[in-house]
Image (spheres, grey):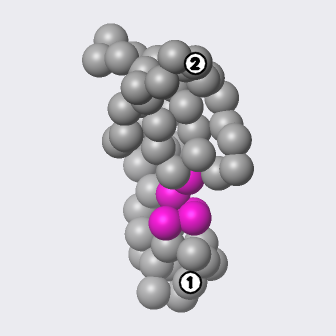
Amino acid sequence: MARQSGLIKLNGTLGGITFYKTQDGHLARERWCRCFKNCNDPNFQRTRENGAEFGALEKLASF
């Protein structure tokens, strides 16, 4: 995570970079898909499956 240090603090997404505020200050991060260049890469199929399963279980647990 990168810290924003300029006079103008941004919130939202701009060109694949998300700017947001936390208790640690104003931060920025790059979108996940841009890091790997190809979200549909067959090498990451199990990772996507595990993420989908975890997300579904997390939604169930929140009730």
> Which residue was labeled with disc 1?
41
9 w.r.t. 34: above or below: above
Queried whether the magenta region covers residue 54, the answer comes back as no
Whether residue 40 is situated above or below residue 26 in the rendered picture: below
Q: Amino acid at mark 1?
A: Asp
Q: Nearer the viewer, residue 38 or 57?
A: 38
Q: Residue at position x 47%, y 37% from top?
A: 28
Residue 62 in sight in this render? no
Q: CA distance from mark 1 to mark 2?
A: 37 Å
Q: Position of residue 29 (x, y in %)?
A: 47, 44
Say which of 59 and 10 sits in front: 10
Q: Main secondary structure of the magenta part?
A: helix
Label 2: which residue? Answer: 8
Residue depicted at x 50% and y 78%? 45
| Residue 34 visible to an observer of this rendering | yes
- Nearer to us in this view, 53 or 51: 51
